[in-house]
């Protein structure tokens, strides 16, 4: 697909209707602005949901969809996203968040049932750019795992925090629920 920034602002020439053009798999596509966005940003998932960009759908209902990832970590990598433009996890209603997880669970089961080589599933949601979120539209990655597939989450843990620090953090978070 090339270097497409999911956060690239719309450009509008004097007297012209807002639009954004890009090259997608060799095709020039002109996209319409998101009608429900308070900011004028391009959202690749909204473009897919409006039919401006192609996608391979695995599941659809009135709340969420599941599509194949066009840049998969492993074969079968799926995405589950809400139909409504919601940039971050905190922007999701309880209903949407629950349906996203339900569909992620169901598609994970479908991946396991459809391929005997699937040995596990990773669910991944990056919430915000500092967490690695590349598209400002909340979504869950459903990543099938295969023996020796080379994918993994690498972390470097330091010393465990003191129990008092854990308790202070737990109280602070609980107070803000």
Image (spheres, rainbow, N blue to C red):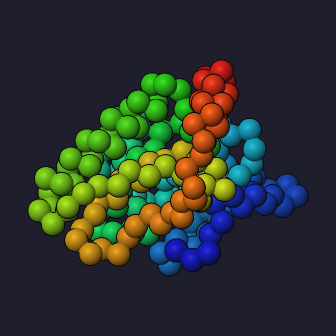
Q: Relative to 14, does residue 98 appear above or below in the rendering? A: above
Side (left or right) of 109 relative to 174: left
Task: Give the total number of marks visible in the rendering.
Answer: 0
- Which residue: 63% across, 60% down? 6
Task: Residue 94 in the image: state x and y as whole percent.
Answer: 49, 25
The quarter of the rendered structure image containing the C terminus is top right
- Which residue: 27% across, 47% down? 107
Task: Residue 59 in the image: state x and y as whole percent.
Answer: 30, 44
Q: Relative to 27, does residue 59 appear above or below in the rendering? A: above
Side (left or right) of 60 relative to 127: left
Task: Residue 19 in the image: state x and y as whole percent.
Answer: 70, 57
Side (left or right) of 74 relative to 125: left
Task: Residue 153 in the image: state x and y as whole percent.
Answer: 45, 63
Examine the rendering and report whether any part of residue 41 can be seen: yes
Residue 176: image quadrant is: top right
Q: Relative to 33, does residue 6 appear above or below in the rendering? A: below
Examine the rendering and report whether any part of residue 91 can be seen: no
Instruction: State the residue in front, 144 or 65.
Output: 144
Spot the residue most to the right.
14
- Which residue: 75% across, 58% down? 9
């Amino acid at each position: 697909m090339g270097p497409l920034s999911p956060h690239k602002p719309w450009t509008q020439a004097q007297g012209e209707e807002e639009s954004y053009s890009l090259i997608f798999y060799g095709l020039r596509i002109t996209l319409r602005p998101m009608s429900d966005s308070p900011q004028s940003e391009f959202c690749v998932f909204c473009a897919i949901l409006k039919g401006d960009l192609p996608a391979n759908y695995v599941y659809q209902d009135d709340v969420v969809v599941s599509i194949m990832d066009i840049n998969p970590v492993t074969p079968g990598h799926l995405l589950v996203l809400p139909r409504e433009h919601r940039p971050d996890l905190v922007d999701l209603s309880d209903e949407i968040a629950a349906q996203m997880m339900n569909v992620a669970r169901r598609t994970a089961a479908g991946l396991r049932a459809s391929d005997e080589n699937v040995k596990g599933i990773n669910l991944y949601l990056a919430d915000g750019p500092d967490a690695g979120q590349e598209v400002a539209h909340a979504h869950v990655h459903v990543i099938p795992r295969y023996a020796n597939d080379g994918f993994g989450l690498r972390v470097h843990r330091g010393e465990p925090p003191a129990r008092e620090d854990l308790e202070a953090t737990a109280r602070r978070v609980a107070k803000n629920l």
